[in-house]
Amino acid sequence: MKKAKATALPSPLEARAEMAKLAEDIAYHDRLYHQQDAPKISDAAYDALRLRYRLLEEAFPQLAPAGSPEKRVGAAPARGFKKVRHLQPMLSLDNAFSDEDIADFLARIRRFLKLAEDAPLPFVAEPKIDGVSASLHYRDGALVLGATRGDGEEGEDITANLKTLACIPKKLKGHVPGFVEIRGEIYMTQDDFFALNRRQEEEGKPLFANPRNGAAGSLRQLDPSITAARPLRFFAYALGEAPESLAETQQELRGLLKSWGFTLNEPSRLCHDEKDMRDFHAEMEERRADQSFDMDGVVFKLNDLALQRRLGFVSRSPRWAIAHKFSAIKAETTLKNIIIQVGRTGALTPVAELEPVNVGGVMVARASLHNEDEIARKGVRVGDRVIVQRAGDVIPQITGVKDDAAHARRAKFVFPDTCPECGSLAIREEGGAIRRCTGGLICPAQAVERLIHFVSRPAFDIEGLGDKTIREFWQEKIIRTPADIFRLKRRNAGLCLEKREGWGEKSAQNLFDAIDARRTISLDRFIYALGIRQVGEATAKLLAKNYGSWQRFAKDMQAAGDKDGSARAQLVNIGNIGASTADDIAGFFAEKHNRQITGDLLEEMTVEDWKEPAAASSPLSGKTIVFTGTLARMSRNEAKARAESLGASVAGSVSSKTDFVVAGEDAGGKAKKAAGLGVKILSEEEWLKLAGS
């Protein structure tokens, strides 16, 4: 992971506001990119948001929400394809941008595994292909299912499309297990991409922004014949669900994939130490322009598969692999304008509109300027020639202004103090960096985005209520609050939706049926749908799991407004929920208007109590564990990861709700408190037995 550099940092209050806004922007662009293949910003601009968020989270880890973008992969599957639940999560890779980052990565692994500093750790190095991840299921050697990554937990069934690709074996060669899952990357060569865009232009169709965009758009066609006509290729690079006995090393696994008939991402190399890793990265960066496919870095995977399994995963990426990105690519262009966008939480964000410029193969036309302080710090003015940089092909940013005689004569940008959407006063919190509209639900930008969030797939997932329909219904005052959605059918005698342009009796009835199907919803989805700041999907599940029912959650969150009370103490004691997130949750319930809206909504539907997933059947499932002291057999991080993988919650302090305290050597006050409360204390050996390690 790239470390935050020694530079001026915002205050904690500013960081909190900026992190919330960045998380909101990232989630929005994830939906556009992964669900609709219709990004509004370049890959470079998107990853600049990611990097900025990561730098802030590293500097202020206590402010990180449980729903952090660092814990989320992709976006939920788009409508139009059958959903597929992955047998194992399909996660993304953490990034490194320097040799120092790689050294830190190796040190983290050694600490986690409790290895000596000079312990050998061979890695397999492979080119990082800029494509679309796919999962292939083979039963008795025959291809039976193909799926996209989606949000990492659930993807789209694109079997018919994948079967049109000659580069994907329909039947595996040689000896194969009864079932095996192959994972790899769908991509397009640069020559094929340019040829495809020429055909698109000749036929008067939209052009693709880059090879990755072309591959994604070609792959996710409802008509498989369109996919068959597109020049797609496939590299295999990993196994998903498969017998552990197939291979002992990553190198053996690559050989096995090749023997079954797959093409591998080459060239690859076994690196025995850090120097080998640096040398391979430098060599591939030098050869980058000579490759037929887009390559934005090198992936390093620990060669020992048994150690991979021990290391497991953290947040949205494996601990045993990393992508070392290539160095920065720069270009010069003109800053045409600075516009202000208003987000769902009312945050005003300045966006730089650029004269489109090719930066390492990607056309960059926009870049976020984050906030008014960033504009002042960089000194950018409309009309300036600016330097745009993408580090490792993923970090778009305006790094500076080209000095010219006219710069001083250009007007400084004046940040508005009113909302461009509704004209309400825009206030900057004391000590904060973000200016927010005070219009609330009277502001179209906020109200509409909140409703779009409410019906989104991770929330109520109402088929037929897309962005366009929500905006139309808002403008015509058909829907103003979430409860209005559930009243549509009763009000239709006056609305006559079936007579609207583009509608009919069937489409109107389908919408009513889709709404009725969501009159009962799980607690975690309901909490997420409310759009509370810093409460993403992961946080919503965490809250649902800890409080169990809506009645208890709502009651305790109102009580959590008292910062010195027991309800607030219990809230912040939940793993990954810090003071900042607790403030936003308690603040939501402190607002009378929010309580009225949820009360109105609950008259139209029912919230189910939390249910543990059926798969969570271990003796630790649903238990709360606290670790204290030093463990001899594994690091604290490995023990925590193991507990969470078995369905347990790991807390930082002991309370009457704690189920087990695992006491290592030199256990102190936590063990004493547990004994006083009658909480069961486990030795390390008892813990290992319970965890099946």
Image (cartoon, rainbow, N blue to C red):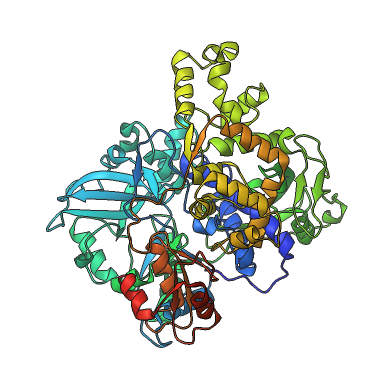
Please tell me in which quadrant of the rendered image residue 267 appears: bottom left
Location of residue 619 by image quarter? bottom left
In this view, the residue in front, 662 or 44, is 662
594 and 20: which one is in front? 594
Residue at 26%, 44% in the rendered image: 145
Q: Position of residue 350 (x, y in %)?
A: 72, 48
- Residue 277 appears at what percent x and percent y? 41, 76
Q: Is residue 601 left or right of 178 when viewed as pictured?
A: right
Q: Closer to the camera, 201 or 135? A: 135
- In which quadrant of the rendered view does residue 244 lie? bottom left
Task: Name the residue furthest right.
Answer: 409
Number of numbered callouts drawn: 0
Q: Identify the residue at horizontal 40%, vertical 60% (top origin).
A: 647
- Residue at 58 percent of width and 64 percent of height: 573
- Is residue 517 rendered to the left or right of residue 559? left
User: In this orientation, does residue 673 appear?
Assistant: yes
Side of 662 relative to 19 (left or right): left
Q: Residue furthest left?
A: 175
Q: Position of residue 409 (x, y in %)?
A: 87, 52
Give the side of residue 172 with respect to residue 544, left or right. left
Residue 269 showing in the rendered view:
no
Q: Quadrant of the C terminus?
A: bottom left
Q: Residue 299: x and y, percent?
A: 41, 66
